[in-house]
Amino acid sequence: LCNQAGSGDDARPLASQVSPMKQFRQYVYALLLCFAFAFCRAHQGYAQQEATVFTFAYNLYQDGRYDLAITEFDKFMRDFPQSLKLSDVLFYKGNAQQKLGQYDDAIYTLERVLSQYPNSLMVDDALYALGDAYLQKGALQDAANTLNRLTSQYLDSPYLLPGIALTGDILAKQGESASAIQSYMYVLDQTTDANQRESLLLRLGNAYRQSGQHAKAIET
């Protein structure tokens, strides 16, 4: 009986035969691979488009075409609301507005960098630009408060010395010539850049004249 039961070719399945469940699993696996591949392709295309739009707007900014740059930065924020570059975009947009003398708009935009992206690498950049915008607007106390935050919290920032020098400008406008001179002298002692030193010496000379130290003003 045992021999008879195992004698036929169809008595047991061939090794090459696949169960329906295994076929289904293979189908699902292949389908998932297709979806994953399509997602990766779409993501790569999205990232490439994002980089292209940002670069185009940034190049307009670098070329001094600030009106067009602002338009393109707005388009970027509208089209890529989850981008990791949003703090950069807001910073450059605020700078462009400042270049155009749109100080209220610049202040609003730069404040957004600080409030919405407090951990961004652009915070110290934004603080310096915001302090300058307040100064240009004539809001001296707001400018001083902003720059004090920069110079007290971001000691490794490349904007530290420019921030101290800008604080000197605020002090000079407030009639505090002695404090302004101290600010300018401190920055002069720390920098070797020829252009920065020339600018600082001019500002220092004005501060000496303002304080009545005409001989030092001439010497400077």
Image (cartoon, helix red, strand yellow):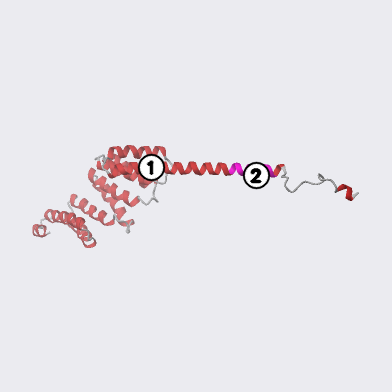
Give the amino acid type for the residue marked by disc 1 in the picture: Thr
Query: Which residue occupies the extreme right position in the image?
Result: 1
User: Could one spot residue 179 in this view of the protein?
Assistant: no
Who is closer to the viewer here, 184 or 86?
86
Residue shown at the point (52%, 42%) measured from the top left: 39
Which residue is denoted by mark 2 in the rendering?
26
Between the C-alphas of marks 2 and 1, the distance is: 39 Å
Query: Tag 1: Cα neighbours inside 10 Å, few (<14), some, or many (≥20)?
Result: few
Q: Is residue 219 left or right of residue 10?
A: left
Residue 87 in the image: x percent, y percent? Answer: 37, 46
Q: Is residue 155 left or right of residue 184?
A: right
Residue 48 in the image: x percent, y percent? Answer: 42, 43
Q: Is residue 192 left or right of residue 36?
A: left
Residue shown at the point (39%, 39%) measured from the top left: 77
Residue 82 in magenta stretch: no
Q: Main secondary structure of the magenta part?
A: helix
Counting residues from the start of the chain, the first of labels 2 and 1 encountered is 2
Residue 52 tag number: 1
Residue shown at the point (33%, 41%) measured from the top left: 57
- Magenta segment: 22-32
Which image quadrant is residue 151 in? bottom left
Q: Is residue 215 above or below residue 146?
A: below
Q: Which callout, 2 or 1, points to the residue nearer the camera?
A: 2
Mark 1 residue element:
helix
